[in-house]
Image: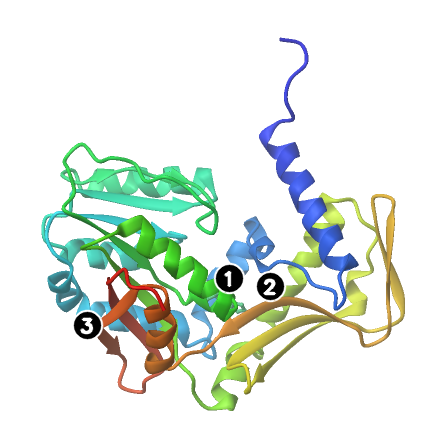
Amino acid sequence: MLKTAPSKSSSRLITFQHDVITGLADSPKRLPCKYFYDKRGSALFDEICELDEYYLTRTEQAIMDRYASEMGAQIDSGAMLVEYGSGSSIKTRILLDHLIDPVAYVPVDISHRHLQRVAERLRADYPHLEVIPVTADFTRPFSLPTPRQPATHCAVYFPGSTIGNFEPAQAERLLRSITERCGDGGGLLIGIDLVKDVETLERAYNDDAGVTAAFNLNLLHRIRDELDADIDVEAFQHVAFYNDAASRIEIYIRSLKRQTIDIAETSFQLDAGELIHTEYSHKYTIEGFSKLAARAGLELHRSWTDDDRLFAVLHLVVTGGQA
Ligand code: AVJ
């Protein structure tokens, strides 16, 4: 075989370049938030999770620490636990420790290397649990593995308020795909960030140390370095604010001057002050999220929150019914 297919890394680069060019050609300009997470971006996100202002991670963790045994009791025995976007497995471990005889744990993630590492460590610590990592983008169709020991049902774990990145219509579609994947007897345990005062919300995305700004602007560094683009990264600024009507934090990169970005053969004009959209982080009430989930065939079964009602973990079960 002399002629080979493009390597995994070059096809990945082609997709990245395509998505960047498509987004910058759009009006208003946008860049997909999934590209935040290269090596540096993932490290910056870990730093965000430690910030005083960023209450989400530590609050969800505290809810898990306090209520994992109740959650475990809600999820019937013999489950195949499927985790969407399995980042650090800290929250998962607490849940696994409290599930009753789970037959398999299936972490689903786009990062193959990261998945293998997580799987290795879990196998060592949970010798009776079959760990079956699946490398996939959970927003696209993918099939679930069949565990050696048959599962009585499928339980999806989707922590971290990742659902907040999706606009309501997309979120509903994603929940519908979970309903269909799990079928009767299935359920979903999901972490959502709750609506709260604007000050708390905006502080969480505009920290004093500028870590969130670095995380957002890292997208431009990636584009410059990986796509060999001509960008004056210093001439851009992080912007994040709460859109009350849409119940979401909106994150942008603002151009500080009139300038161009050159990528491959394409040149993109930016006005002074022009915004490039990079991320939404939707905030929900438990009632609002339950309605959205109901349209996707999931019924609210139980919910757990912290004392300040900053964050919630919901257990929803498949009813299968449509809107
Ligand atoms: C990982 C999507 C939950 O929306 O809070 C943090 C990402 N962006 N700071 C969030 C994020 C800026 C985060 N999620």
Residue wearing tag 1 = 45
Q: Position of residue 273 (x, y in %)?
A: 81, 77
| Residue at image coords 58%, 83% | 243
Q: Residue furthest front?
A: 322
Say above or below: 191 vs 118: below
Q: Secondary structure at mark 1?
A: helix
Say above or below: 65 vs 228: below
Residue 163: image tag: none
* Direction from residue 201 to residue 176 in the image, left or right: left
| Residue at image coords 50%, 67% | 169
Q: Is mark 2 within 8 Å of ligand 1?
A: yes
The alpha-carbon separation of the residues under discs 2 and 3 comes to: 30 Å
Q: Kindly identify the amino acid type of the residue bearing the numbered disc 3.
A: Arg
Q: Secondary structure at mark 2?
A: helix
Residue wearing tag 2 = 215
| Image coloring type | rainbow
Q: Is mark 1 within 8 Å of ligand 1?
A: yes
* Direction from residue 94 to residue 229 in the image, left or right: right
* Direction from residue 208 to residue 79 in the image, left or right: left
Residue wearing tag 3 = 66
Image quadrant in which you'd find residue 244? bottom right
**Looking at this view, is 84 or 89 the one in front?**
84
Q: Which of pointers 2 and 3 lies earlier in the amino acid sequence?
A: 3
Question: Callout 2: few (<14), some (14-19), or many (20+) C-alpha neighbours within 10 Å?
Answer: many
Q: Which of pointers 1 and 3 lies earlier in the amino acid sequence?
A: 1
